[in-house]
């Protein structure tokens, strides 16, 4: 079975405002509400590829119930744990001003609820796949990823981790199956600037030496690099297309890579599926559909999936 963990899911209110003016009343020209959070994005892309997963994490209040309702509409199973106080965060994303967001805080997650999630994760077994994605809420211990990795260490669970600097470095001793820093995050870890695909390879190998099995580095317009567990390096330029939506592209890449690997156990195929899924979401108004991913895959490889 496949599981995704999102500690702090959201309702994403995505709007466009023509001729936005600060300090004035503005009206939307388009609006969309979607369930959000990195792990949830992974579940949605997997579902679009025909792969079932179960969403784990925490929800609260009216917005939490709406997240659950919308996941059901997508056909995604959930075992999200209800928090009695507060409400799940609502994120405002202003499409007409690129990169402008106001993200909510989310509920306080108490120790007994964290333990409830750990008890559920303790049931995972050999052959299961787990995605750990995103930041850890301030109300939770900052070693939550480490504790999950330690709990599952040696059980044969394939774990993909998409997190920033310290969260990422702390899980490496537990040999995650895949990690996905971008080139800026990788550069921050080693206090250097990485602009080309060739330049990221030695630093990705350093993360392998610290424990990661596969290091997938996304580089936006420069493409991506995979330093694979078999010792080979795969790299590709960015597919051609019009950027419409940067939200969820990295999550889509993680989902595409793991979907590709689970299908064929081939790192090159998984790498190309990751690039195709990430780019297809970037070229789409929403998270990519199977048809959109297949179209970009054909551009990347010159062949069908």
Image: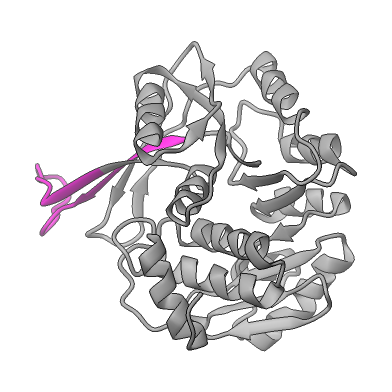
Is 240 or 276 nearer to us in this picture?
276
Is 6 or 102 nearer to us in this picture?
6
Is 232 or 64 nearer to us in this picture?
232
Is residue 282 something one can see in this rendering?
Answer: no
Q: Residue at x 49, y 85 (%)?
A: 303
Does residue 181 sit above or below 6 in this rendering?
below
Q: Position of residue 27 (x, y in %)?
A: 9, 45
Q: Position of residue 42 (x, y in %)?
A: 52, 50
Q: Residue at x 46, y 38 (%)?
A: 76
Q: Position of residue 139 (x, y in %)?
A: 61, 26
Is residue 112 something one can see in this rendering?
Answer: yes
Q: Position of residue 294 (x, y in %)?
A: 43, 72
111 sits left or right of 256 in the view: right
Q: How is the image coloured?
A: one colour
**Is residue 76 highlighted in magenta?**
no
Total numbered labels placed on residues in the image: 0
Does residue 57 sit above or below 192 in this rendering?
above
Does residue 129 sit above or below 253 in this rendering?
above
294 sits left or right of 192 in the view: left
Q: Residue at x 76, y 46 (%)?
A: 127
Name the quadrant containing residue 172.
bottom right
**Is residue 25 highlighted in magenta?**
yes
Magenta region: 9-32
Where's the N terminus, which quadrant? Answer: top right
258 sits left or right of 84 in the view: right
Q: Residue at x 76, y 69 (%)?
A: 190
Name the quadrant containing residue 217.
bottom right
């Amino acid at each position: 079975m496949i599981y995704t963990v999102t500690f702090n899911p959201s309702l994403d209110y995505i709007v466009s405002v023509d001729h936005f003016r600060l300090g004035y009343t503005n009206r939307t020209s388009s609006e969309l509400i979607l369930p959000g959070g990195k792990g949830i994005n992974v579940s949605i892309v997997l579902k679009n590829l025909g792969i079932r997963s179960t969403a784990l994490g925490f929800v609260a209040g009216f917005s939490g119930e709406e997240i659950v309702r919308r996941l059901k509409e997508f056909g995604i199973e959930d075992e999200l744990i209800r928090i009695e106080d507060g409400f799940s965060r609502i994120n405002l994303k202003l499409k007409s001003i690129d990169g402008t967001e106001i993200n909510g805080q989310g509920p306080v997650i108490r120790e007994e609820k964290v333990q409830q999630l750990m008890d559920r994760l303790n049931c995972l077994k050999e052959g299961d796949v787990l995605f750990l994605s995103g930041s850890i809420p301030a109300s939770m211990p900052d070693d939550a990823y480490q504790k999950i990795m330690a709990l599952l260490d040696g059980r044969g669970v394939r774990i993909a981790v998409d997190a920033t600097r310290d969260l990422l470095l702390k899980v490496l001793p537990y040999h995650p199956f895949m990690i996905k820093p971008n080139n800026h995050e990788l550069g921050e870890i080693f206090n250097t600037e990485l602009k080309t695909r060739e330049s990221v390879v030695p630093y990705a190998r350093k993360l392998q030496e610290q424990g990661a099995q596969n290091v997938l580095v996304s580089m936006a317009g420069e493409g991506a690099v995979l330093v694979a567990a078999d010792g080979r390096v795969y790299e590709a330029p960015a597919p051609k297309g019009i950027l419409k939506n940067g939200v969820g592209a990295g999550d889509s890449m993680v989902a595409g890579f793991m979907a590709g690997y689970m299908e064929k156990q081939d790192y090159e195929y998984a790498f190309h599926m990751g690039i195709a899924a990430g780019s297809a979401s970037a070229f789409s108004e929403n998270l990519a559909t199977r048809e959109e991913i297949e179209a970009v895959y054909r551009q990347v490889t010159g062949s069908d999936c």
